[in-house]
Image (cartoon, rainbow, N blue to C red):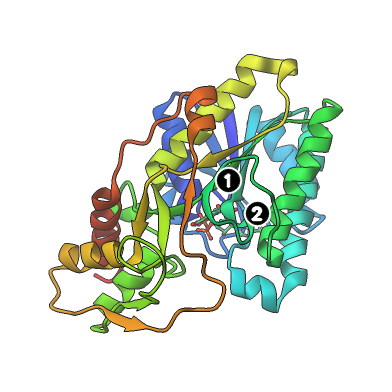
């Protein structure tokens, strides 16, 4: 069986490609290489195309037919919250328009099975423990485009046009190998490590929250564990066949780590002699957000196998390699 991974040259997509191969699937990739890195997917067949461009529909249809694609894992997207606020049109064009084009080409190529990269950002300002039944109220265009894509997939699933599952990722971190490391310092762990590499003190924004040490608490998930969740979702869809009903799953560990814990472990991993720096709270940061992963555990049988040290240590190794 061959799975098409859109955004397969990206940080998460390339881990999914590796996980697919480890589970006996063949993988092919569509990516415009806007943030993806081709060396992450050696030997993998690549269609270099912008999914938001209507001209890509024919190219993707043909690529799926040629490679006898049986399923799609859709990770290609723009993912920066502040950028989405500054440039909503690009986010709607790529994240929704791109998804529409992709599904149109799947329809033409006769492919129905679909796993979607969603995000905890669909929950907006959720606080505390988040289940899949928590209200979805995104507070920025990025989260809105992911939620709208889920709505589209639900509607298409209801009429049998796709069989889709959406995975709502919490804070993704770490790397399986140095070559697949995250090259963008947008998430906390790479941001902290970047500051350490640059000889600056990592910052903690607010230490007066009602949490165990006063800093914000979040749920971190190792990218290799996250990648495996896609394979489980895909095999569940394949097993259910036409009986599959659209479903959403949180992907997090259910454990909250504080920003201070993360920063201290990052400093320890690096061996650098820097101190953390405390800054004022940032507006809009909820004190604690943690996934309730009960559903993905019971329905898909998913378990995480990496802890925070694995995430921080592998991310540090990857960052050193990137800067070597
Ligand atoms: N990294 C996180 O913490 C996180 C958290 C929640 C959800 N997500 C979602 O996971 C997915 C992957 O994120 P990532 O961290 O690997 O990001 P990434 O930027 O490393 O990967 C995205 C990939 O998509 C490709 N791409 C972007 N626009 C494209 C387009 N128009 N046409 C074709 N290819 C395009 C990029 O070149 C890149 O290879 C995204 O959908 C993102 O919203 C990520």
Outermost residue on the right side: it is: 159
Asked which quadrant contains residue 323, the reply is bottom left
For the point 61% across and 53% down, the residue is: 76
Q: Is residue 288 left or right of residue 235?
A: left
Coordinates of residue 47 in the picture (x, y in percent): 62, 48
* Residue at 51% across, 59% down: 36
In the image, residue 250 lies at what x, y percent?
54, 41
Any part of residue 231 in sight = no
* Label ID, residue 168: 1
Q: Which mark is residue 34?
A: none
Dot 1: within a 10 Å radius of its alpha carbon, few (fewer than 14), some, or many (20 or more) residues?
many
Name which of mark 2 and mark 1 comes first in the sequence: 2
Residue 131 in which image quadrant: top right
* Left-right relation of 260 to 227: left
Q: Is residue 48 visible?
A: yes
| Residue 135 percent location from the top left of the image | 68, 49
Q: Nearer the viewer, residue 250 or 256?
A: 256
Quadrant housing the C terminus: bottom left
CB atoms of marks 2 and 1 within 8 Å: yes
Residue toward you, 102 or 41: 102
Query: Disc 2 and disc 1: Cα gap in Å?
Result: 8 Å
* Label 2 secondary element: helix
Nearer to me, 179 or 63: 179
Point 30% across, 65% down: residue: 213
- Could you say which disc has been placed on residue 122 in the image? 2
| Dot 1 beta carbon under 8 Å from ligand 1 | yes
Indicate which quadrant contains ligand 1. Answer: bottom right
């Amino acid at each position: 069986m061959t799975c098409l991974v859109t955004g397969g040259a990206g940080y998460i997509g390339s881990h999914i490609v590796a996980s697919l191969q480890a589970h006996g699937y063949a993988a092919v990739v569509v990516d415009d290489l806007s943030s993806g890195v081709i060396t992450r997917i050696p030997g993998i067949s690549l269609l270099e195309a912008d999914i938001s461009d209507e001209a890509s529909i024919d190219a993707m249809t043909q690529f799926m037919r040629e490679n006898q694609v049986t399923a799609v894992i859709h990770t290609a997207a723009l993912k920066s919250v502040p950028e989405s606020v500054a440039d909503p049109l690009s986010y709607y064009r790529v994240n929704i328009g791109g998804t529409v084009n992709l599904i149109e080409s799947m329809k033409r190529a006769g492919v129905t099975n679909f796993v979607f990269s969603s995000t905890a950002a669909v929950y907006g300002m959720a606080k505390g423990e988040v289940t899949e039944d928590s209200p979805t109220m995104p507070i920025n265009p990025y989260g809105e485009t992911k939620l709208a894509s889920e709505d589209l997939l639900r509607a298409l699933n209801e009429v049998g046009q796709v069989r889709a599952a959406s995975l709502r990722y919490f804070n993704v971190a770490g790397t399986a190998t140095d070559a697949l490391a995250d090259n963008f310092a947008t998430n906390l762990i790479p941001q902290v490590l970047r500051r350490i590499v640059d000889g600056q003190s990592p910052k903690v924004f607010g230490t007066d929250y009602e949490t165990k040490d006063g800093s914000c608490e979040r749920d971190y998930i190792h990218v290799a564990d996250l990648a495996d969740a896609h394979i489980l979702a895909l095999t569940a869809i394949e097993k259910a066949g036409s009986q599959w009903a659209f479903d959403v799953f949180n992907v997090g560990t259910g454990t909250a780590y504080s920003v201070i814990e993360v920063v201290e472990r990052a400093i320890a991993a690096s061996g650098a002699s820097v101190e953390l720096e405390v800054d004022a709270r940032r507006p809009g940061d909820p004190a604690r957000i943690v996934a309730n992963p009960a559903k993905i555990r019971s329905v898909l049988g998913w378990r995480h196998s990496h802890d925070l040290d694995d995430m921080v240590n592998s991310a540090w190794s990857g960052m050193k390699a990137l800067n070597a």
